[in-house]
Amino acid sequence: MSKRPTGIQPSYRYSHQQQPSRSAYPTFLSLQETIKLQLTWASKGILDAFRWDVVVKTATSDREIRSNIFKSLLLNSISLTSIYAFDLLLQPLVHNHPSWLHRNVGWFYRVLWLLPVVGVSYYLNSSWCNLIAKRSFVLQHGNRATYQQPVTYNGMLTMLATSAYRAVMIVTSVVVSFALGSIPFAGSWISFAFMCWVNAYYCFEFVWVARSSSLAQRVRHLEERWAYYFAFGFPSAAICTWGSGLANAALFAFMFPAFIIMAMYARPVPKDPYNPAPPTESADTVRFPSPLVPIRMPVFAIVIWLNDLIVRVLSVGGSAGARHRRTPSETTEQAEEGVGAELRNISRAVPARGYPQAIQGRKLGDRLPSNGKVPGAERRKRD
């Protein structure tokens, strides 16, 4: 029996190996199917943002939630009354008045009354909304679902750092919104769309924090489901476009507890943004969305960049950050978690057990010299 020529075998092996690569080529949905799915997710977001039956049921069934909602509504009502009393009554009376005192009554009213009231309202409203969110999460998932952080010195530092970071992110979001609004022609529409996503982020932030999601995970979750979160934030953003800046902020704070409860019971879609289509006959086939429609919309790219810049400027341990590069949002995420210069100094001062000093330096992010030797070893040799 004659043997086959050796030259034929490679061609046969090559053609045989091409079959798995062809079957592994990604399958995409059509543009029409992808748009239809995005509209379906947006409609789900609108429906979840109008679940007032859930708000009424939750508020009437729990005394703690009902009490905090009442206090939030009362305080924000005072803020709204103060703002509109100035805009509708006081300002028209003193407008273009010849007396210097009358012309500057508005300035004194803002500095001595409005700004303190709004500041106190922001602080107390954040505390009450946090209690509402925690209680709603416990009612939905049970006591074991919540993580009780121990009241320690480091825990207090983490809580203060989280509050400070949240305030910085709110300020940068407002600044970006005003900057987008200054774009000619389409600026107001772009700014409104951005505020829809910002409002949705803060409504769901308590849910993500309760589930121990990091900053990068929160942002990624929203940006990969941009159609749903845009529709969820649309009603609150539409309500907050009727008055001045302070009035819009007070209106959002007035509605904020209700949207937090809605977010607790919402189910954002899709579950898998990279395989969003319903299961077909071949369950193993992954059908990606159309390449013409983005899976992830970089909504918070500018905000994260500004936060990263602010934290780097305000960071006390800036010299430690210069030794190695960090990915975007890593600096702000560490600031939100309370990882500061004090913790780095403590970790350097107390050696870890069971690790040589060279390995400890690598664990802390310290880069060794180019010769690969530990600086401490050279000093011991010189001595």
Image (cartoon, rainbow, N blue to C red):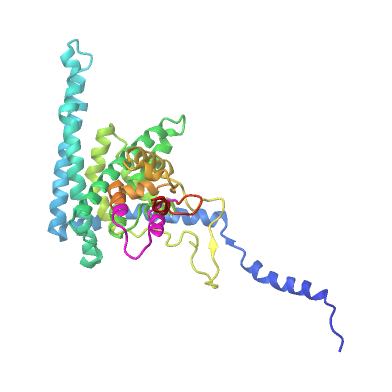
Residue 140 within the segment the image draws in magenta: no
Task: Pinpoint residue 78: horizontal percent, then vertical percent.
Answer: 15, 37
Asked if 246 appears above or below 95 in the picture, the reply is below
Toward the viewer: 138 or 244? 138
Answer whether residue 51 is visible to the viewer in this image. Answer: no
Q: Which residue is drawn at 23% across and 14% down?
A: 96
Q: Can residue 274 be seen in this view?
A: yes
Q: Residue at x 19, y 59 (%)?
A: 150
The residue sitting at the front extreme is: 383
Q: Quadrant of residue 311?
A: top left
Residue 357: x and y in percent read 38, 58
The residue at the point 59 percent across, 62 percent down is: 26
Q: Quadrant of the N terminus?
A: bottom right
**Measured from the top left, where is residue 258 in percent x and y?**
24, 51
Tell me which residue sits at (78%, 71%) in the image: 11
User: Would residue 243 appear left or right of 69 to someone viewing this image?
Assistant: right
* Range shown magenta: 347-367
The reply to whether the magenta stretch includes residue 348 is yes
The residue positioned farthest toward the bottom in the image shown? 1
Q: Where is residue 56 in the image (x, y as percent from the top left)?
A: 20, 56
| Left or right: where 8 falls relative to 67 | right
Hey, which quadrant is residue 360 in on the image? bottom left
Up the image or down, 252 lies above or below 35; here it is above
